[in-house]
Amino acid sequence: MLVNDMSMSPRLTWLRPLALVAVIVAWLAVGGAGGQTFGKLSAVQENEASAFLPSSAESTQATELHQEFAPATTLPGIFVVDGIAGEEDLAAVQAFVDAVIETEIEGDAEGRTIGEVLSPPASEQAPQAVPSEDGEAALVAFNLDAAVAEETAGEGTVGAIVAEDIRAVWAEQDTELDGHLTGALGITADLTEAFAGIDGILLVVALVVVLIILLIVYRSPVLPFLVLATSMIALTGAILAVYAMASADIITLNGQSQGIMFILVVGATTDYALLLVARYREELLRVPSPYTAMARAWRRSIEPIAASAITVILGLLVLLLSDLKSNAALGPAGALGIASAFIAALTLLPALLLIGGKHARGVFWPAMPRYQESADGKDAALADPSQGKGFWPRVARSVDAKPRRTWLIAAGGLLVLSAFVPTFKASGLGQGEVFTTETDSVQGIAVLEDHFDAGATSPIRIFVPEDQADAAIDAATGVDGVSEAYVLTPSVAEGAPPGVVPNEQPIVVDGTVEVVAVTAVASTSNAAADIVADVRDATHPLGDEVLVGGAAAEQLDTRETTQRDTLIILPTILAVILVVLIALLRSIVAPAVIVAANILSYGAAIGLSAILFNWVFGFPGSDPSVPLLGFVFLVALGVDYSIFLMSRAREESLEHGTRAGTRRALAVTGGVITSAGIVLAATFAALGVIPLIFLAQIAVIVGVGVLIDTFVVRSLLVPGVISDIGRRSWWPWHKKIAD
């Protein structure tokens, strides 16, 4: 496929179309298999925060210990009703409860009703409407058996269908009361609904955006679709691999990781395609045969594209060092996606571009590059592209004229934006704050906090030696934000209020008791996690064996685990990227410049994002992993554009010297790299269609960061510094570079 015409015997030319067809058929087979797996990824997702914490986390150990005190594991569903005016309204709520427990679960193989999958079953203890102290609201606990909730029913899980049915039954009630399903059941259902758009609307939006950009770039009705087809088939290959790993429990996949993987594959494939096609178009002007042109383009593109792919893959795999399984899972999932994009861009796309044989130039129609033999016999490659009249030749000449002033101004602008980094709020989000839209569960949390001790449904759980129970209660109730604390007794474990059974003895397991601490705010809020930190400070002095857990503790441990991961992952990624760049550029100085420039670019992206988040979008904060993942994507992906530029600069510098080589490289790569940056920023922007703050913030950080890399770092800062340093940029192998 990529063999030069001059080196192939005429008798063997029939092998070329056969090889092209074989490559295309092989990829179509991958696409067919991956297409069938496309909708199955949601079945192997795990979106519960507790599933991602390491076994060493205090909340994880507390959860395991709690199973010994109350073996029945439930998924709490809290239905809150606002606007209660009297007994008549309470009776209406109870009638709603009775209708819910009699509702059959659609698609359930056993034909069970909702009442039968509750814990305890409604036949043993039917849910009751509990009025608030102010009498203006009521609460009903629909607690599902957690194992049953994860069972498949129809096209979803039992938990998701039950949540949908509860809301549907309420909608059928003839009442003007305001009711909402919240708690873990409601929040999980809303998350599932949000992630449902990943397989559909996210991909459609991303592909449409990329198609529009490619139509503008190529001005061809054919070529953009070949690139998009390559991206989609590359994605199916990644899906096959990720699904196999998630099914085998090798990785713990969540909806966020899946969405990011989709965007990475589409964006990376398109970027690699843009670089290869640009080289191919150049060579079509120099040689008559499309096969020879592709062979030359492939050989000259493989090194920078491979370096780019390896950099991103290694950067993503560094996430395996994360103690948080959600981050660790994104590493191999994203790496598999990039690998699939790399292979497809260098095998499937060339085959599609050459399928027309000697008429392969037709894919560029109507602006087909035509071979024109030079009248003086000189290679067109010797012409200086920076002396042209286009935008990028003018930029290249401007940078070359005053390189020091250029890079100082660029660096100064980035430093100004970086000054806003301290305003970036990454202390965490409560589960009720993760959505960009007002969901039913979020509205329920607001009602819960207005009328109830919101933390009662999912309290803080403190495990202490039996003789320290009273001390633990005193310590917990002394924490601001804790409304009450009591020991877990058999009746309380079965759902009764504390104190119902006089003089009841606590549950004791191996000399340990469980103290239940109720917070005034919902356990799903970020404030509850802060209260857990204070409770731990107050109770840990009681003994080394003290454990503090619960849903809010899981949020706190997630935050602290991410902070520890950041200290390990960031320097490791920088070291990996530096090594790859040294190997590619055969230099130490130039790679150091690129890495430093990308760190500065990341700071500017975070600073600009902080401005947007705080004063434009009004986000309540950020998940602690947002800056970490933003760093991984920006440094790993952003360095791609410097790789594309500097690999061409080294190629030109070997013959023309550093200043001229950098100028020529900037002029010739400016258009394609800018197009690639815009495509990648646009594909990440598509994450904003999923109504989750986490993905919206990743979209903004990566989007603005890539544009900064494209228009400032790669266009002004890096070429300015390299031109200013000159030949020493290639030290210690600088002697090969022309003076």
Image (cartoon, helix red, strand yellow):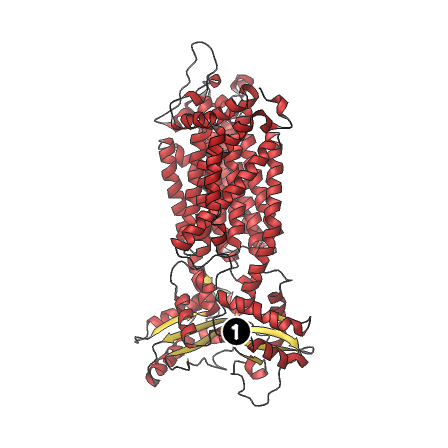
Name the residue at the bottom extreme.
Answer: 502
Q: Is residue 623 visible?
A: yes
Give the class, few, some or many, for how many residues have Cα within 10 Å of label 1's Cα (few <14, many ≥20).
few
The answer to whether residue 391 is left or right of residue 36 is left
Frontmost residue, 118 versus 551? 551
User: Residue 64: x percent and y percent?
Assistant: 62, 69
Q: Residue at 42% of width from left, 55% of height from top?
A: 614
**Residue 703, picture quadrant:** top left
User: Residue 160: x percent and y percent?
Assistant: 45, 65
Is residue 278 positioned above or below 470 on the image? above
Q: Residue at 52% of width from left, 80% of height from top?
A: 495
Frontmost residue, 398 versus 513? 398
User: Residue 1: x percent and y percent?
Assistant: 52, 27
Q: Which residue is mark 1?
A: 480
User: Residue 553: x percent and y percent?
Assistant: 56, 67
Is residue 431 positioned above or below 420 on the image? below
Is residue 495 positioned above or below 163 on the image? below
Frontmost residue, 124 versus 604? 604
Q: How many marks?
A: 1
Residue type, label 1: Asp
Quadrant where the C terminus lies?
top right
Q: SS class of the residue under badge 1?
A: loop
Q: Is residue 32 visible?
A: no
The answer to whether residue 362 is left or right of residue 52 is left
Frontmost residue, 406 versus 710? 406
